[in-house]
Image (tube, rainbow, N blue to C red):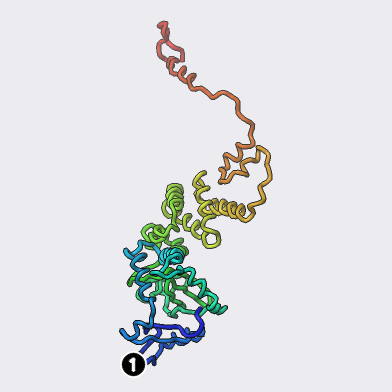
Amino acid sequence: MPAGKVRYDNLRPAVAKVLGFNRSRVENERWVIFRSFYGIEPFYCRRGKEGAHEKGGVEGQIGYFRRNHLVPVPDVATIDELNAMIDRWDVEDEVRRIRSRPQSIGERFAIEAPLLRPLPTERFETGRLFTPRVDRYSVIVVRTNRYSVPARLIGQAVRVMLHVSHLVVYHKGQEVARHERLIAKGGSRLELDHYLEILLKKPGALPGSTALEQARRSGKFTREHEAWWAAARRAHGEAEGTRALIEVLLLHRHMAHEHVAAGIAAALRVGAWTADAVALEARKVAQLDSEPGSPPPARSPALAWLDEPGVVSLTERRMSALPPDTRPLPSVAIYDQLLRRPAAGSPSPSGEEGRP
């Protein structure tokens, strides 16, 4: 971070009021705490054209960056994706030279870097604190936008730290939810996991829920989830099949997403429509990931089914230990001879009456 005086324009988050035509300023209280924490000594530029020459080429370079990278506006799904793009553009800009200067931007920064001070070991909390109450829909309202929290907190007050790109929800000192911040007004960010306990009691509310739709768009609810859910409903009915899916979704709370996804894929291959089967396969994958250097021991052919990556049906397990069946397949051709026998009491082909 810079040492000594740092030049600032009269930005509103720092300056509450400009006093006269000198450099005296009434600073915002939050800004005073921030600059004191980092040991910054501000030097405020004059207003208008008189202070334009005091800013150097900073504003000009901001305009260059905007015109070359942000026009047209990038099409991104999340703020994190946009920040990653900006980081990449910053790295690419290190080889650029400003006008006719002999050094590139990266070379000039390498000269400046030894003059900078290290950051403090502790981070300054830049978020704003809110204390909303959870409504009956398990939602809190922050800056006109709605965010979900776990259903067990309905009716309780929580603490929210609102940051530039995200917000964190706390209850009794524990983090209970984290969301990407919504920029537009009147939006909703609902996490499907927050409603699973309620949906276990009311499975019919899941198919048309907003939380499910947002989970699909975000990629958390995958095609494997959809396929397993459809098969479970065919096997167990709408309500019980949906409950089985919710039990699978609960596995994500204490198992990695990729492990649960692998368990669902394994259950799909063999037609296992229970959450227990998915959990078993997910644990197998998790164990293999935790012990990559220990191959499983070799088994006899009769127990080879144990080494299969997927769930094996009970019938396949029992038949694996039986000797091969070499008998010929049965034929149904002999059953037609019953149709050729005369019925009781009907005349025989020779003209004699059939005996009873």
Relative image position of residue 291 (x, y in whole percent) = 64, 54
Residue, x 35% and y 61% (percent of image)?
A: 75
Question: With respect to residue 180, does 322 lie above or below?
Answer: above
Question: With respect to residue 105, does 333 lie above or below?
Answer: above
Among the 4 quarters of the image, the one containing residue 302: top right
In this view of the protein, which residue sits in the foreground, 92 or 245?
Answer: 92
Please, what secondary structure does the residue beneath circle 1 have?
loop
Residue, x 33% and y 72% (percent of image)?
A: 185
The residue beneath circle 1 is: 21
Question: With respect to residue 91, does 319 lie above or below?
Answer: above
Residue, x 48% and y 68% (percent of image)?
A: 106
- Is residue 195 at least partly visible in the picture? no
- Is residue 143 at least partly visible in the picture? yes
In this view of the protein, which residue sits in the foreground, 280 or 185?
Answer: 185
Residue type at tag 1 = Phe
Relative image position of residue 174 (x, y in whole percent) = 53, 74
In this view of the protein, which residue sits in the foreground, 315 or 104?
Answer: 104
Residue, x 35% and y 74% (percent of image)?
A: 60
Relative image position of residue 339 (x, y in whole percent) = 43, 18
Number of residues whose C-alpha sits closer than 10 Å to that of mark 1, classed few (under 14), some (14–19) or many (20 or more): few
In this view of the protein, which residue sits in the foreground, 33 or 252?
Answer: 33
Taking the view exactly as shown, the residue that stands out farthest to the top is: 350
